[in-house]
Image (cartoon, grey):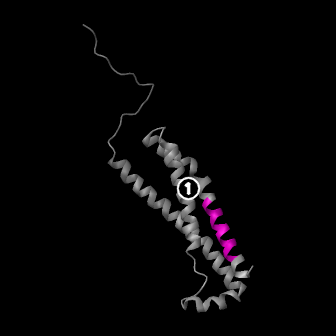
Amino acid sequence: MPEILAFYLVGLCLAAGVGLAFYYGIGDSIEAVVERVFGPRIGPLWGRTVRIQVVLMALVGGLATQFYGCGGYSDYKAVAQDRRLMLEKTTTQVASATDYAKWFLIGTAGISALVIAALPSRPAKDSSVTPRHPKAG
């Protein structure tokens, strides 16, 4: 296996690790918020969907890193011969994965805030409050 391919694949594995860290780090919070807004039947489905999309966005961030310069594929040989440059590109993959996942979550939070603001308000289901009944004559 060429050395540059090993660096590239290690970068993708680390990008997947970033995605999994986001998946488990924010998973319960997202699911709880969605369940609170949309109900117990839809909450787990949308919570899991957002979590999977965060992992995918981290992988896209890792895949978006170019291992060649502005000269196109002609710069590929220069990168393949320099381990320091390959390590720099692998580090860029991990940083890009973190940025993609972070901005996806910020965008999702913004869109979710708009959706929640647009939803009609529902009365809270609180068991400690009893409804008032008019007194019988």
Residue type at mark 1 is Ile
Q: Is residue 11 magenta?
A: yes
The residue that appears at 31% across and 17% down in the rendered structure is 133
Marks counted in the figure total 1
Residue range corresponding to the magenta coloring: 7-19
Going by the picture, which residue comes out furthest to the left? Answer: 137
Instruction: Tell me if residue 94 comes above or below residue 80 in the rendering.
Output: above
Instruction: Tell me if residue 6 comes above or below residue 58 in the rendering.
Output: below
Q: Is residue 112 magenta?
A: no
Instruction: Tell me if residue 84 comes above or below residue 17 in the rendering.
Output: below
Rendered location of residue 3, percent (x, y): 73, 81
User: Considering the image in quadrants, where does the N terminus appear?
Assistant: bottom right
Closer to us: 26 or 7: 7
- Name the image quarter holding residue 134: top left
The residue that appears at 52% across and 48% down in the rendered structure is 47
Q: Is residue 111 left or right of residue 135?
A: right
Secondary structure mostly taken by the magenta-highlighted segment of the chain: helix
Rendered location of residue 8, percent (x, y): 66, 76
Q: Label 1, secondary structure: give it.
A: helix
Q: From the image, tell me which residue sits under label 1.
A: 52
